[in-house]
Image: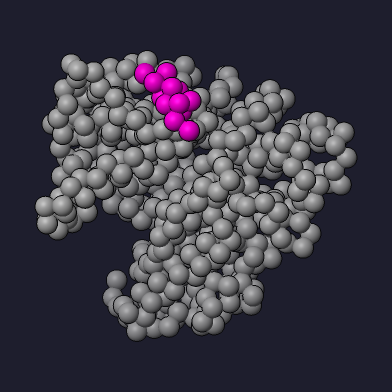
Amino acid sequence: MSLETIKNDILMGRTCLGIEFGSTRIKAVLVDDNNVPIASGSHDWENRYVDGIWTYTLEDIWTGLQDAYKNMADDVRNRYDIELETIGAIGFSAMMHGYMPFNKEGELLVPFRTWRNNITEDASSRLTELFNYHIPQRWSIAHLYQAILNGEPHVKDIDFFTTLEGYIHWQLTGEKVLGIGEASGMFPIDLETKDYNARMISQFDALVAAKGFPWKLADLLPKSLLAGEYAGRLTQKGAKLLDPSGTLKAGIPLCPPEGDAGTGMVATNSVTKRTGNVSAGTSVFAMVVLEKELANVYDEIDLVTTPTGNLVAMVHCNNCTSDLNAWVNLFKEFAESFGIEVDMTKLFQVLYTKALEGDAECGGLLAYNYFSGEHITGFEEGRPLFVRTPESKLNLANFMRVHLFTAMGALKTGLDILIKKEGVEMDRITGHGGLFKTKGVGQNFMAAAMNTPVTLMETAGEGGAWGIALLASYMKNKEDGETLDAYLANKVFAGQEGETVEPDPKDVAGFDEFLVRYTAGLPIERAAVDSLK
């Protein structure tokens, strides 16, 4: 597309903006009228561990958002010599679920509790039994009920609770809404009504009735919206919050805010039945759009929805690349000690590629990447570990291979339930996220772990910020009756085949052998958690 055409799209407000709050980076992506990224900006941030809670402060949230937006607007100015004054539509996304309760004055009652907190086991277990429906620890309703079980004084004062992107959307538009995919991680959704499950809401109200709270659950939840529905406009206050320079004008429409699970589905064109995607970064999760309900309830399997309200089986693991990154940084420090200047992109490529030379089952090595707890394997806290026997084959190839394998170990544990116990079939799995950046490594190993072909799209690197920009574009540009599936297939991904890797039988057998060792070694991780405080 010509420079002049892009400039006209910007000036005429034919663009769409997606901003996603990831675990370590806030990213803003601006797309043109053809849904092609034309500018971007980002802001790096890190969660804090305060008083036993993984959190980000409100200051972290707003300074990060403003910096990411400013960097994107600067990119527009530098590329096209234009000040960004208006945008066709905006969407916000963030790390799924968690807990942000507010009082009538709009004040946050306790620090934001992120998805990373495994502190609601009691509530999760009781609600799962009550509803006969798995309620994961990171879901908002589990956090609320755990606060009730703990006798936390803030609960009586709650007027509204939501997730991170729901909070940002509310502050910028005044609308207390969520996209249905993210809403399904606050409280279970009725697939027929496309709204919160009324029977379960009644059960919850009855469960806590004796507490005498001045609220009913339905009054606290944000309204659930489907992809394509209008979700409010940027207010004057919101425009100033997003762009303190005052350049951005109010009145821009916003699409329903969605979680990173939903935007990952959109960014990989995985919203139709029998498709799925794997997002692998700080955390890792696999999403499979189901043809029917599962026969049984599993603690390891979460049931959420696509942004259009179709049922999705989700295997979510808290830990993926954090320990890998720590080891790569150690190698960087080693090289720099010899006066060698290190290019991080090349270092990742060299070390990841080295893993391809390792023994199929990692030479008897064992590692756990548990920076935080891991519910699938029953850990409320984590201790990163590397373990070997005197007979293990310790070399660089096996060392890197075992850390790549263990990044998928908990995921594999959950996926085996879907594939082997429930007989779920998939036509296509698409990968995205940092684990897949080095060509032919993460993709190959994920195919081995899932024993399923894995596809990477050229656009997969754009991630969830692009995915929420596409949802904003769909709301703005869809034709009457046009489904999200059709919009993505015909107007975004048409002609894009991606690169598919078939599972190597040797790697599949090697991963299975590694998983036996991984499962047998879990008591070692338990001992580390219990002994190292």
Can residue 305 be seen here? Answer: no
Residue drawn where x is 59% and y is 35% of the image:
119
For residue 254, which quarter of the picture?
bottom right
Q: Is residue 387 left or right of residue 70?
A: left
List x then y, in percent, for residue 145.
71, 36
Residue 144 screen position, x and y as percent:
70, 41
Q: Residue at x 44, y 67 (%)?
A: 68
Q: Is residue 101 left or right of residue 25?
A: right
Figure check: 21 above or below 533: below
Q: Nearer the viewer, residue 133 or 144?
A: 144
User: In which quarter of the view is residue 363 placed?
Assistant: top left
Q: Between residue 97 and residue 254, name the one nearer to us.
A: 97
At x 24% / y 45%, what residue is drawn?
Answer: 330
Q: Is residue 78 magenta?
A: no
Which secondary structure is most common in the magenta stretch? helix
Point 42% across, 75% down: residue: 73
Tell me where residue 115 appears, x and y as whole percent: 54, 43
Q: How is the image coloured?
A: one colour
Vertically, is 112 above or below 117? below
Q: Which picture quadrant has residue 176? A: bottom right
Q: Give the residues in magenta.
A: 521-533
Q: Of 469 and 329, which appears nearest the observer?
A: 329
Question: Could you tell me how many numbered marks the image carries?
Answer: 0
Residue 530 lies in the magenta-colored region: yes
Q: Is residue 153 visible?
A: yes
Q: Position of residue 406 (x, y in %)?
A: 33, 30
